[in-house]
Image (cartoon, rainbow, N blue to C red):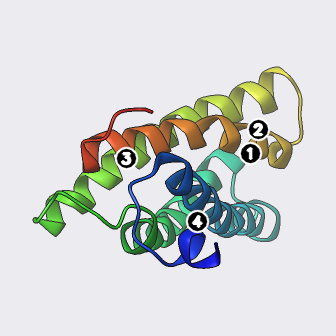
Amino acid sequence: MINKLFKEPTDDIFLQLFRYIFVGGTAFVVDFFFLYFFSDICGIYYLISAVLSFIISVLVNYIMSTKWVFNQDNIDNKVLEFNLFILISTIGLVFTEILLYFFTDIVGLYYLVSKIISAIIVLFWNFLARRVMFYGRDFI
């Protein structure tokens, strides 16, 4: 079971979703840490900090996702693959920024709580978009 969950290549959506959540969790910890660091330690406005922390976490996510989660890629051109990954991630960043602003400035939540909520919502966009765009798989 450990081999199936963590080692063997797979195109099973549920195993990929498990791996994606694991990888996403790792990238989220990186993103969350740097969001806090840039905002509270460096004093940068939280929406700008969110962009900076996004850049760092998307690189972590890209490396882990392409090597482990979606390891049957259909794209031979790695520059194109990376650019598509960045495009999907950037759309996710736009969603995140809107949600962060909404939950923090409109609803009045603490910006780190808003980040958690927005990350959960955007996770599904990122997973499904990457699965369909990179690997020609259906949503289910």
Q: Which residue is mark 1?
A: 115
> Which badge, 3 or 4, comes first in the chain's sequence?
4
Circle 2: residue type: Ile
> Which badge, 2 or 3, comes first in the chain's sequence?
2
- Other residues around mark 4 within 10 Å, as few (<14) / some (14–19) / many (≥20): many
Report the disc number at residue 27. Answer: none
Q: Which-is-in-front pick, marks 2 and 3?
A: 3
- Other residues around mark 1 within 10 Å, as few (<14) / some (14–19) / many (≥20): many
In depth, the one of 2 and 90 nearer the eye is: 2
Looking at this rendering, what residue extends furthest in the left direction? 77
Q: Which residue is mark 3?
A: 130
Report the Cα–Cα distance between label 1 and label 2: 5 Å
Circle 1: residue type: Lys
User: Where does the image place residue 44, in percent across and percent down from the top left?
Assistant: 69, 58
Above or below, 97 relative to 75:
above
Question: Residue 49 falls in which quadrant of the image?
Answer: bottom right
Looking at the rendered structure, the secondary structure element under dot 4 is helix
Looking at the rendered structure, the secondary structure element under dot 1 is helix
Q: Are marks 4 and 2 in contact (CB under 8 Å)?
A: no
Looking at this rendering, what residue extends furthest in the right direction? 109
User: Where does the image place residue 99, in percent across and percent down from the top left?
Assistant: 66, 30
Looking at the rendered structure, the secondary structure element under dot 2 is helix
Q: Which residue is mark 2?
A: 117
Q: Which residue is mark 4?
A: 23
Circle 3: residue type: Arg
Apparent side of residue 38 relative to residue 89 in the rendered image (left or right): right
Q: Residue at x 57, y 62 (%)?
A: 19
